[in-house]
Image (cartoon, grey):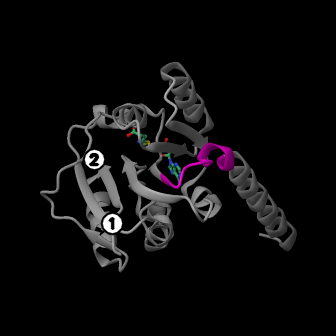
Amino acid sequence: MTQAEATDYRHLHEQRRSEVRAALRPLVAGHERIVLEIGCGHGHFLEAYAAAHPDVFCLGIDLMSDRIRRGTRKKERSRLANLAFLHASASDLLAALPEHVKLGAIFVLFPDPWPKRRHWKNRLIQPEFLDALADHAVAGAPFHFRTDHVPYFEEARAVVAAHSKWKLAPSTAVWPFEFTTVFQARAPSYQSLIAHRIA
Ligand SMILES: C[S@@+](CC[C@H](N)C(=O)[O-])C[C@H]1O[C@@H](n2cnc3c(N)ncnc32)[C@H](O)[C@@H]1O
């Protein structure tokens, strides 16, 4: 990458972050604690979760704008006041989250598994991601992760178990809310883990 390309890239990156910050501010206004779903797809899970938890504000984010548009249409139809969707990456969202808005719970359901070794660096569950998540999570906040990809599950469990700010719950821990996601419906089997933000 040339220096000019690097400058352009940095500029675009900063611009994107400030767009996410501007779009996020009105959505979370008046909310000090939110439930965040990262990679929410069309929002099936979060819409059901928000309907079942009317006192909790739920925010779903996804990299793909068409999925967020569909989620937003669902929200408009259901008229759930405690639900919002935003087109943002996990890193942009976490960087843009106002200081006073804390994560009360986090869901990552069937994230892209990036099965090829040379793509593993793209997997969401990395120590730096867990650090950023922990910086915004309240003490004790549960992090829920579910995947149908066995090697990714094993890797994610190892990364979470080794992280100083998260404590893995026993494998018998009860999943708090069941609602089949689009990718879950296609999966022959899957595994789940829960971890809590260490105080
Ligand atoms: C395999 S789909 C699963 C969608 C949904 N959770 C489900 O279970 O049906 C993974 C989703 O995560 C989104 N995604 C991937 N990386 C992301 C990131 N860094 N930040 C936000 N969303 C991301 C993708 O765009 C995609 O919609």
Snapshot quadrant of residue 188:
top left
In the displayed structure, 182 sits above or below 91; it is above
Q: In which quadrant of the rendered image does the N terminus lie?
A: bottom right
Residue 5 position, x and y percent, is: 82, 65
Q: Which mark is residue 148?
A: 2
Q: Is residue 8 left or right of residue 123?
A: right
Q: Which residue is mark 1?
A: 140
Residue 163, percent across and down? 35, 77
Q: Is residue 116 above or below residue 43?
A: below
- Which amino acid is tagged 1? Gly
Q: How many numbered marks have been drawn onto this rendered protein structure?
A: 2
Q: Position of residue 195 (x, y in %)?
A: 29, 64
**Which three-letter amino acid code belongs to the residue tagged 2?**
Asp
The residue lying at 42 percent from left, 32 percent from top is 47
Front one among 156 and 169? 169
- Magenta stretch encompasses residue 190: no
What kind of element bears circle 2?
loop
**In this rendering, position of residue 67 left or right of residue 148:** right
Residue 62: where, in percent of width, then height?
54, 44
Q: Residue at x 55, y 27 (%)?
A: 70
Corner quadrant of residue 69: top right
Tell me where the magenta segment starts and ends, as one range. Answer: 24-33
Numbered disc 1: secondary structure? loop
Residue at 87 percent of width and 68 percent of height = 4
> Mark 1: is the Cβ under 8 angstroms from ligand 1?
no
Q: Which of the pair 144/55 is nearer the observer?
A: 55
